Image (spheres, rainbow, N blue to C red):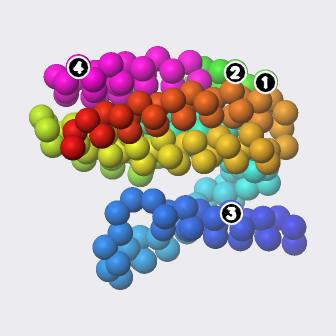
Amino acid sequence: MKKNILLISLVAAASLFQSCSGNHSGKSGDTTKSTADSAKVSDTAKTSGTAAANPDTAFANKAAVGGMAEVALGKLALSKSSDAKIKQFANQMVTDHGKANDELTGIAKNKNITLPATIDAEHQAKMDSLSKLSGAEFKKAYVMAMIAGHKKTLDLMQSEASGGQDAELKAFAAKTAPVVKMHLDMINKIHDSMK
């Protein structure tokens, strides 16, 4: 019974998370996508019982995917942009998120948590979308993606730091949150300079 309630809560949280992220036009297709994504989350939770049973494991999985995406998007920005500020920021993403990914991988290994090996469909879609852009269009879209991504990641880290149960993962989140906040401040400054 407790597992079912937790599973339902996870699916509801995923639906809420999905509905809060990205651009929604309010069309009925968005509802279908959210429902499909919720079903996908439900199936994932069923097959990886550890993630469904342990919010700290769910945090580790989300943090791992987000970190891998930041590195991948940073590398994409380094190859696509000629803007010095974007390149500097992207370099920082590759370095800082790479270090955080390595640290999280070490913690997960010690706790027998299997982290995802690749980014999820949402981040892959963002990569695909950005890879088709160039010049000012790429810069604008990358900056907006970084702002949205870092806001989500900061919320994730702060939530784990204050409410997580696992001491090591809480400490990781508490240590990582200020770095993510610094990234958010940096990308907001770049955004403001574009106006």
Q: Amino acid at mark 1?
A: Asn
Image quadrant holding the C terminus, namely top left
Question: Which label sits in the foreground, 3 or 1?
Answer: 3
Residue designated by label 2:
106
**What distance separates the C-alpha of mark 3 from that of mark 2?**
25 Å
- Can residue 49 be seen here? The reply is no
On screen, residue 44 versus residue 97, left or right, reads right
Percent position of residue 118, x then y: 48, 36
C-alpha span from label 4 to label 2: 33 Å
Frontmost residue, 51 versus 84: 84
Left or right: 119 as drawn, with respect to 76: right
Task: Provide the residue designation for mark 4.
Answer: 84
Mark 3 crowd level (few <14, some 14–19, many ≥20, 10 Å Cα): many
Q: CA distance from mark 1 to mark 4?
A: 39 Å
- Most prominent secondary structure in the magenta stretch? helix
In contact (CB < 8 Å): disc 1 and disc 4: no
Secondary structure under the numbered disc 4 in the rendered image: helix
x 30%, y 40%: residue: 192
Q: Residues within 10 Å of mark 1 (few under 14, many from 20)?
A: few
Disc on res. 110: 1
Task: Name the residue carrying label 3.
Answer: 10
Q: Amino acid at mark 2?
A: Gly
In-front residue for pair 183/71: 183
Q: Earlier in the sequence, mark 1 or mark 4?
A: 4
Q: Which of marks 2 and 3 precedes in the sequence?
A: 3
Task: Say few, some or many: other residues with alpha carbon within 10 Å of mark 4 (under 14 / 14 to 19 / 20 or more).
Answer: few
Mark toward the viewer: 4 or 2? 4
Asked if disc 1 and disc 2 are in contact, CB closer than 8 Å, the reply is yes
What range of the chain is rendered magenta? 72-100
Vertical arrangement, residue 104 with respect to residue 30, above or below: above
Q: Position of residue 66 (x, y in %)?
A: 51, 39
Is residue 146 among the parts visible in the rendering?
yes
